[in-house]
Image: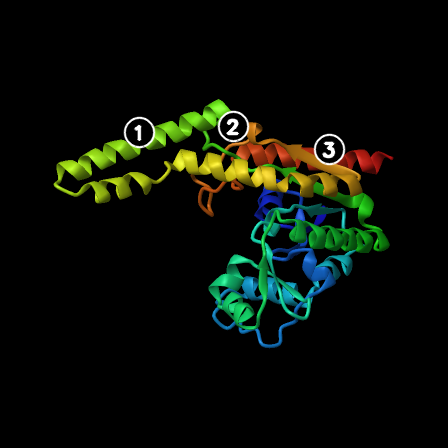
Amino acid sequence: MKIAIFGSCVSRDTVEFMPEAEVVAYVARHSVTSLESPHGTAGIDLSDLTSAFQKRMVTSDLKGSGIERIVKHAGDLDVVLLDLVDERRGFWKFPDGTTMTNSIEVESCGAARTARREGARLIEFGTDEHFTRWSKGFATLIKELRAAGLWEKTILLDIEWAGAVDGAQHPQNDGLASLGRRWRRLHRGSREAGRELSRGRGIADAWQSMRNIKPTEAEEYAERASAANQSYEKYRTFARSVLQISITRYSAELRIDPNHRWGPQPFHYREKDYESISTEISENMNTDNRR
């Protein structure tokens, strides 16, 4: 089974649980906005990226060549997997209208600083401007997949971010639960302020320590996942509207793997989650083959 991916580790990690699968093209760190208006590599220094994979992905984004890397394998592909996680950091829009995905690699190698110096603006995920540009880019992606005969083989992995670590209960996101989390944080802050006062610190220092109390790891995961899932909603809805097949998992069904090889993140799931998703991919492929 030969697979192409336009997406992130969500798709790539899922494929690891499909022993019969071979990934022949993996397009990551590549917003679909770059398919329409790639900035190009001129003036962008990637020399600080030590990984050949990272350089290849960022270069592909700068050239807007992601879909070309998939389409050239069209005759051999059994399935194309899409996911939207790499859109989460937004993109840089240069004064000439060209764009560059704001990947972690772009930040780490200094390309983001170069973009700022050249007058580029960071278009943040979830804003109306981002969604407008993204929806046009996604339509271009689908058009190219259709032209290559791959649209009916394309599956959207519509997977929400997990809000709790494996073994923990999924957080409630209603008003009462949110109020409870804020109250517990305030209570921790008041305890810390009391300790500051007992050490002889002034009221101003105690108040500052109370204001600066950090969320627990569980609170941070819950808040990040809730915010991300809300921001993704209009993107997911649009993507599902133009694709035949989507596989959906909601946050309450998922958990973060604390021992994930890339570290615990709301988009790094348990083995059982990946196994469930990969099974559904295979089932969809077998259904298509029977038609």
As measured in the structure, the alpha-carbon distance from the residue carrying label 2 to the one carrying label 1 is 20 Å
Q: Quadrant of the C terminus?
A: top right
Q: Mark 3 packing: few (<14 Cα in 10 Å), some, or many (20+)? A: few
Q: Is residue 184 above or below residue 41?
A: above
In the picture as drawn, the residue positioned furthest to the top comes out as 176
What amino acid is labelled 2 in the image? Asn
**Residue at x 62% of width, y 45% of height:** 11
**N-terminal of the two: label 2 or label 1?**
2
Where does residue 114 sit, x and y in percent of width and height? 53, 71
Residue position marked by numbered label 2 in the rendering: 173
Q: Which mark is residue 187?
A: 1
**N-terminal of the two: label 2 or label 3?**
2
What amino acid is labelled 1 in the image? His
Q: Mark 2 packing: few (<14 Cα in 10 Å), some, or many (20+)? A: some
The answer to whether residue 165 of the structure is visible from this angle is yes
Q: Nearer the viewer, mark 2 or mark 3?
A: 2
As measured in the structure, the alpha-carbon distance from the residue carrying label 2 to the one carrying label 3 is 33 Å
In the picture as drawn, the residue positioned furthest to the right comes out as 291
**Residue 63 image-quadrant placement:** bottom right
Residue position marked by numbered label 3 in the rendering: 283
Where does residue 210 sit, x and y in percent of width and height? 29, 38
Look at the numbered disc 3 and give the secondary structure of its residue. Answer: helix
The answer to whether residue 269 of the structure is visible from this angle is no
Q: Is residue 10 above or below residue 116?
A: above
